[in-house]
Amino acid sequence: MTAVYITIDTEYSAGLAVRLGTHARAEIFDRSITCRTSEGDVGIVHQMEVMDSHGLKGVFFVDPMPALIWGTGAVAAVVEPILERGHEVQLHLHPEWLEIAGDANPLGKRTGNNLYQFTEAEQVELLGLARDHLVAAGAPPPTAFRAGNYGADDATLRALRTVGIRYDSSHVPGIAASDCRISLSQADQSVVRHEGAIEVPVGSIPSVGGPRHAQITALSHWELEAALRYCVSEKVESFNLVSHSFELMSRDRTRPNRILTRRFAAFCRSLANMTGADSATFRSRPPQVGDETGAGAMRQNPVRSIARMAEQFVANRLYGAK
């Protein structure tokens, strides 16, 4: 059985907090978490409704750093509906919130956009603080982590071990120029023990121009379904897919992106109907060292790649470049 991890990075937008001001928490919540529009919501509640309708479970990597500004209640508003529906909450962290926090910054004047910009000791402090805020918001103690912007390094993995978090999923071999600084390569696409943590790479598939990461915005449904079929037929242990709480919106976060909402629903339907694959979480089916995490060995299909490029061109024209 191929374990499919539908992982959703779930975060208040730090960019909106800067642009709108920290007084606009309710609006930022509506545009980042519930993704409320006049045509209906397409954020985490919608995503869970789609998964629930197909009997699937998701893993929501929740960023608790906004608690520095708005308190634990702002994070609980994110965590509670996820747990109520029986999905999994794990830990995410965007250090951009340190600059927004001002005097509440636990590191004083130290700021940065990515965790790799901080020392190991500073990362231990940030990860411990974020874990504690997440638990205070009602989540079980996290066992897995993904860095905001994928911006982890080897020190992050050692820091995770220090604070008692076993899994990391920040290595993204399908993006050649990502912000990840973990000392693994694009060839490292299996679960591996590295620097004291268990690294679970984001899945990828071969594509024109090189590997492409398994994300709802990055692959067409045709590619996603082909990857699933490959994983099942070749008995690949897992497929690690990424999305975001706001991913199904237009770029300006005012409208649903109908191409992406249909793609997400179609993927969930394909997974539910596919014998030999099922959704999994880090608790229900913990990743094992040696597991493949995607369809990186699948034969490249230029026709699928070109069709996706054409679909993305249309989506960008209609909803803004992603």
Image (tube, rainbow, N blue to C red):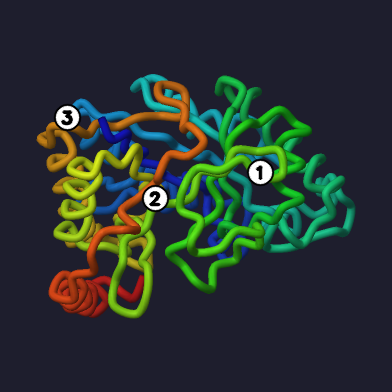
Which residue is painted at 42% across and 35% down in the image?
59
Query: Which of the numbered marks, if any, corresponds to residue 65?
Result: 1
Q: Position of residue 118 (x, y in %)?
A: 80, 57
- Tag 1: amino acid: Met
Q: Compared to 279, does 121 lie above or below?
A: below
Q: Amino acid at mark 3?
A: Ser
In this orientation, which residue lies closer to the viewer: 190 or 126? 190
Q: Secondary structure at mark 3?
A: helix
**53 left or right, relative to 142:** left
Residue contact between numbered discs 1 and 3, judged by CB atoms under 8 Å? no
Q: Residue at coordinates 20% horizontally, 40% vertically from top-left?
A: 232
Q: Which mark is residue 53?
A: 3
Give how far across and how far down residue 144 sits, in percent: 56, 34
Write down the quadrant of residue 238 in the picture.
top left
How many numbered discs?
3
Q: Secondary structure at mark 1?
A: loop
Of callouts 1 and 3, the N-terminal one:
3
**Of label 2 and label 1, which has the lower sequence position?**
1
Q: CA distance from mark 2 to mark 1?
A: 20 Å
In x, y percent, where is residue 251?
Answer: 36, 68
The residue that appears at 62% across and 63% down in the rendered structure is 18
Q: Determine which of the numbered discs, if any, sits on residue 242 in the image.
A: 2
In the image, what residue type sits under mark 2?
Answer: Val
Q: Are marks 2 and 1 in contact (CB under 8 Å)?
A: no
> Dot 3, how many residues are within 10 Å of its Cα: few (below 14), some (14-19), or many (20+)?
few
